Image: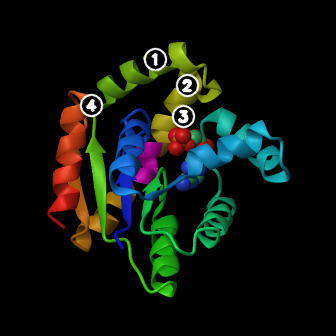
């Protein structure tokens, strides 16, 4: 069983690469962004709680995010391996994820961080906004999301680096090339 985190700022290509990785390796995909979007779309009590926060581009508080993640893990006791996408985004989330994995006799084996600079990110998200109409891709919200990444989420990287679990892959270029480089990391583990 291999569990990995696909890490990167908004617009880095986590969603695209996740889809390809699931097809190739059969991971159970856990995207906290997708889960939150499902809750808001279906107007669940959790969706009602997080809607405003998400629309502002801010991070949802850890306690809410972690509870939702735990529920999702519990639904998949026989997973061959998990691919976490968009989680963890804070150091407490990373710590709790390690604890959940350990409690289940497993671990986060490694993290793949997609490296994309800010200029490229902004141009990708502007393009995605035209294609998908995601409310949180509007400019003001986008600024907030990028700020959240560079003030909070980026601190997760040294957490994994210190434990030799971090692998950085260039996230700029052809989708297939990036995918190939991610697969190389996975296959050499
Ligand atoms: P994403 O699609 O991963 O960019 O997530 C969309 C939004 O969901 C984010 O801007 C946050 O508001 C919320 N979100 C997703 N994952 C997390 C997380 N791990 N921690 C806090 N908020 C999250």
Sequence-first disc among 3 and 2: 2
Residue 102 vs 93, above or below: the answer is below
Establish whether ligand 1 lies closer than 8 Å to the Cβ of label 1: no
Question: Tags 3 and 2 in contact by the CB under 8 Å rule?
Answer: no
Way the structure is coloured: rainbow
Sequence-first disc among 3 and 4: 3
Q: Secondary structure at mark 3?
A: helix
Residue at image point 29% right, 54% down: 112
Quadrant containing the C terminus is bottom left
Q: Nearer the viewer, mark 2 or mark 4?
A: 4
Question: Tags 1 and 2 in contact by the CB under 8 Å rule?
Answer: yes
Q: Nearer the viewer, mark 1 or mark 4?
A: 4
Residue that carries the numbered disc 1 in the rendered image: 126
Q: Which residues are magenta?
A: 149-153
Residue at image point 44% right, 48% down: 151
Residue 175, numbered circle: 4
- Around disc 4, counting alpha carbons within 10 Å, would you say few (fewer than 14), some (14 to 19), or many (20 or more)? few
Q: CA distance from mark 3 to mark 2?
A: 10 Å
- Horizontal relation, residue 167 to residue 125: left or right: left
Q: CA distance from mark 1 to mark 3?
A: 14 Å
Residue that carries the numbered disc 2 in the rendered image: 137
Sequence-first disc among 1 and 3: 1
Relative image position of residue 156 (x, y in whole percent) = 38, 60
Q: CA distance from mark 1 to mark 2?
A: 7 Å
- Horizontal relation, residue 51 to residue 61: left or right: right
């Amino acid at each position: 069983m291999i569990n990995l985190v696909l890490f990167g700022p908004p617009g880095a290509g986590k969603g695209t690469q996740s889809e390809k990785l699931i097809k190739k390796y059969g991971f159970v995909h856990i995207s906290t962004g997708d889960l939150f979007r499902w809750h808001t779309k279906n107007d669940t009590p959790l969706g009602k709680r997080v809607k405003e926060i998400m629309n502002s581009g801010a991070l949802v508080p850890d306690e809410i995010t972690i509870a939702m993640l735990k529920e999702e893990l519990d639904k998949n006791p026989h997973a061959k391996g998990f691919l976490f996408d968009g989680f963890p985004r804070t150091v407490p989330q990373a710590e709790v994820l390690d604890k959940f994995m350990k409690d289940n006799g497993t671990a986060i084996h490694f993290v793949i961080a997609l490296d994309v600079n800010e200029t490229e990110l902004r141009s990708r998200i502007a393009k995605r906004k035209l294609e998908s109409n995601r409310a949180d891709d509007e400019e003001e919200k986008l600024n907030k999301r990028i700020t959240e990444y560079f003030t909070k989420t980026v601190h997760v990287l040294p957490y994994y680096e210190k434990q030799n679990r971090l692998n950085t892959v260039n996230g700029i270029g052809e989708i297939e090339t990036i995918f190939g480089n991610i697969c190389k990391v996975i296959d050499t583990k």
